[in-house]
Amino acid sequence: MSTSKNFADKVVLITGSSGGIGAVTAVEFARYGAQVVITGRNADNLSEVAKQCAAVSPKGLKPLEVLADVSKDVDCKRLIDSTISAFKRLDILVNNAGKGVFSSITDPSVLDKYGEVMDTNLRSVVYLTHLSVEHLEKTKGNIINISSVAGLKPFGRAFLYCMSKCALDMFTKCLALELGPKGIRVNVINPAAVRTNFLQVVGLTKEQSEARYSEMDGKYPVGRVGESIDIANAILFLASDEASFVTGINFVSDGGALNAPL
Ligand SMILES: NC(=O)c1ccc[n+]([C@@H]2O[C@H](COP(=O)([O-])OP(=O)(O)OC[C@H]3O[C@@H](n4cnc5c(N)ncnc54)[C@H](OP(=O)(O)O)[C@@H]3O)[C@@H](O)[C@H]2O)c1
């Protein structure tokens, strides 16, 4: 096992791990020996991911499953408390839970949408980080935030999502400064389109979502949109000791999309 992929004895908490990028990331950490904590709002999906993690774990470690809505402060607190109570430590926090939203500035529900997306994509990260620092300082751990290329460039009708991810990018850079002296690294990954349920949560049908990804496949310089494993691989690298000199960076994983004339 290469050093970059040895997470034996590490406790890794991945938010939004009942599906998509978070689920695949949890399975990969489990495959390389980590004790994973998985969380989301859908209990059935969470149990399914737990089975997949246990099946690949070299020691058959069972994940801790915590049903939680990260937009609720009490759930965030319970999530960290449950992790520490079960394992007495936290090594890696992956702030992945997030959602997209389309809105025009003239939308009558713009402030409701603002609250919803900011609470999920940003406030949760601030609070979970706040709660985790004392534990990560003990383990000299690290944090990976999952942003988007939408934090780096504007997209039509997506200003709320773009703002949430742009703020997450800046939060990462500021926290890398504050937490470096405590031995904690903080990095952010900016994916372009990744084939998950993301577009269906935004409101597209399964067919519309698949059509959108197929259309983008041809436009991306590498000839395809991302898969969850592409982002999981980047997360595992940044979380590993091989990235011990890397903190406060935007790691763009986008198949070249950001620089392409799409
Ligand atoms: N897919 C893309 O094209 C793409 C591109 C760039 C960035 N990203 C970012 O990547 C991250 C993961 O997205 P994904 O593509 O994997 O989306 P996804 O398939 O929709 O998965 C989202 C995950 O987050 C969880 N989640 C959402 N809201 C939550 C809440 N309030 N409380 C707790 N868990 C919540 C969902 O679980 P439950 O439903 O069980 O709660 C699910 O596990 C997000 O931050 C997203 O912004 C995605």
Image (spheres, rainbow, N blue to C red):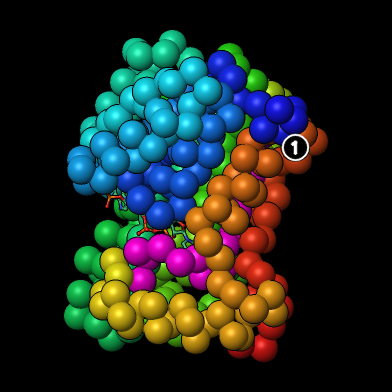
Q: Quadrant of ligand 1?
A: bottom left
Which residue is situated farthest in the right direction here? Answer: 245
Image quadrant in which you'd find residue 187: top right
The image quadrant where one finds the C terminus is: bottom right
The image quadrant where one finds the N terminus is: top right
Is there any visible trace of residue 133 in the rendered image? no
Is there any visible trace of residue 253 in the rendered image? yes
Image quadrant in which you'd find residue 36: top left
> Residue 84 in the image: x percent, y percent?
39, 16
Q: Secondary structure at mark 1?
A: helix
Question: What count of labels does the image hold?
Answer: 1
Residue found 34% across the figure and 40% down from its top: 49
> Residue 76 in the image: x percent, y percent?
31, 34
Query: In this rendering, is residue 84 above or below 255?
Result: above
- Tag 1 residue: 243
The one nearer the camera, 170 or 13, is: 13
Query: In this rendering, is residue 149 above or below 182?
Result: below
| Ligand 1 under 8 Å from disc 1 Cβ | no
In the figure, is residue 41 to the left or right of 190?
left
Query: The magenta stretch spans which residues?
Result: 184-199
> Residue 255 in the image: x percent, y percent?
66, 70
> Residue 166 in the image: x percent, y percent?
54, 62
Query: In this rendering, is residue 43 above or below 210?
Result: above
Q: Is residue 191 magenta?
A: yes
Image quadrant in which you'd find residue 148: bottom right
Query: In this rendering, is residue 188 above or below 115?
Result: above
Residue found 34% across the figure and 34% down from its top: 50
Q: Is residue 253 magenta?
A: no
In the figure, is residue 262 to the left or right of 12?
right
Q: Tag 1: residue type? A: Ala
Residue found 43% across the figure and 21% down from its top: 60
